Amino acid sequence: MKVSRRTLLRVIGFGTLAIASLPRVAFAARNTLRSLRTGIQPGNKTRLVIETANRPTYSLSYPTNQLVITLPNTSANTGITANLAVGGLVKSITQAQSGSNLQIIANLTKPIAEIQKSQIMILEPNGDNDYRLVLDFMAGTTTANKNSYTTASASTTTAVTASRKYIIVIDAGHGGKDPGCIGKGGTREKDVVLSVARKLKNKLDANGFKTYMTRSDDRYLKLAERASIAEKRKADLFISLHANANPSRKMKGFSIYTLSEKASDEEAKKLAEAENAADKIGVEGFTEFEENIRIALSSLQQHAVAEMSEEYATGCAKSFKKSSIEQQPGPDVRHAPFAVLRSTVPGALLELGHLSNAAEEKLLKSDSHQNKLVAAIVKSVKNYNFEV
Ligand SMILES: [Zn+2]
């Protein structure tokens, strides 16, 4: 069972499996159960998926050896059979109608006290799927050997509907009247990143991704416009390309950033201020969008997007290092309030190197080094887990 992360709405950790419930959302229409299934996820997690016609509300309880999910205002569906993965923690599932409530009772192979870790998500409809309430959990001690895990995993994968192309929005920073930073040799950030962005688009397209560029020529775009392109394209991943400048001409190397309203360090803070200053150059009119986006994101969504971004950024740093691209001293992933990253799309801002360093300026201009950067980014995208 695969679920695109793009559709992820809410992630709630419930590490202790204490009784949990989400705020109730009022709705009139009676909900219907569409399907029940389990699968095995990496890390030997059991995933229980409850598919419903409308967005589900739910509460959970945990009698011995059982996980009971109560769905208010929902009808049982006796016409369906639960599709259970071999080797999972759920050995059987029964439906029980209790007044207007439907109870899904998952009988577990282990006492509930031995169930360690979980998360809950509500996923929006996509492709052949309706709304899904997804619960992940795993046993404290795993009994499955590697072979049975692989088998179970493969058998669940066959149930997947034809996967769509993942959508990547590539953002070449700056442009038009905003040159970005400029090297001593006159190399402009906006030109370097556009060149890398074009190469990256070609390579990602060739690797089966669907790509869009926020700009494909030398034009000025507000930061929120860039973020809004990622939103409108329903992107799975947003990659913003930049090059750096530092008062110390000795400073060199790449650095990777994700969004955080609080900067991880003073340097990250200054960098975000410099990159965000691009908006001060331009026309007005997009501040409204930016505010809306910020308001539209619940703290849980922000948390989910931040986690996915972190995962991508960490993998990206790894990929750069593996390609022997010089890294700026410091942590693999830094955090700062970059306006361009404020959206529901997971992503990262890549500072590809320092134009303020003469040797690196030369490298960043060169086709061969740009290709090397592109190859490392492509690898990071291919390694990113687009499904949950
Ligand atoms: Zn920049």
Image: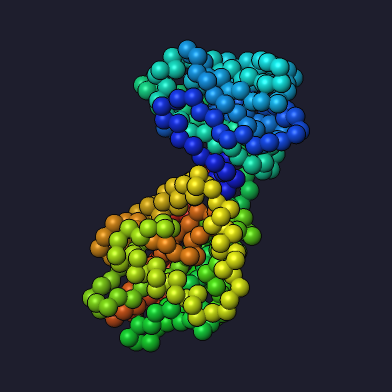
- Where, quadrant-wise, is the N terminus in this rendering? top right
Q: Measured along the vertical axis of the image, is residue 302 above or below residue 64?
A: below
Which residue is at a point 48% across and 65% down the rendered structure image? 339
Give me the residue at 55% from left, 36% from top: 121
Residue 271 vertical placement versus 298 (above, below):
below
Q: Position of residue 118 (x, y in %)?
A: 46, 30
Location of residue 263 (image quadrant): bottom left
Viewer-proximal residue among 291 and 93: 291
Furthest residue in direction right, as rendered: 29
The location of residue 109, given as percent across then percent down, is 48, 15
| Residue occupying image coordinates x 32% and y 58% | 264
Q: Is 369 left, or right, of 12 in this rendering?
A: left
Tell me, yes or no, if residue 191 can be seen here: no
Is residue 30 in sight in this rendering? yes
Looking at the image, the residue that sits furthest to the top is 64
- Residue 162, given in percent of the width and then of the height, sits at 65, 42
Instruction: Choose top left, top right, bottom left or bottom right for residue 228.
Output: bottom right
The reply, left or right, for residue 235 in relation to residue 119 is right
Q: Position of residue 344 (x, y in %)?
A: 55, 54
Q: Is residue 148 left or right of residue 161?
A: left
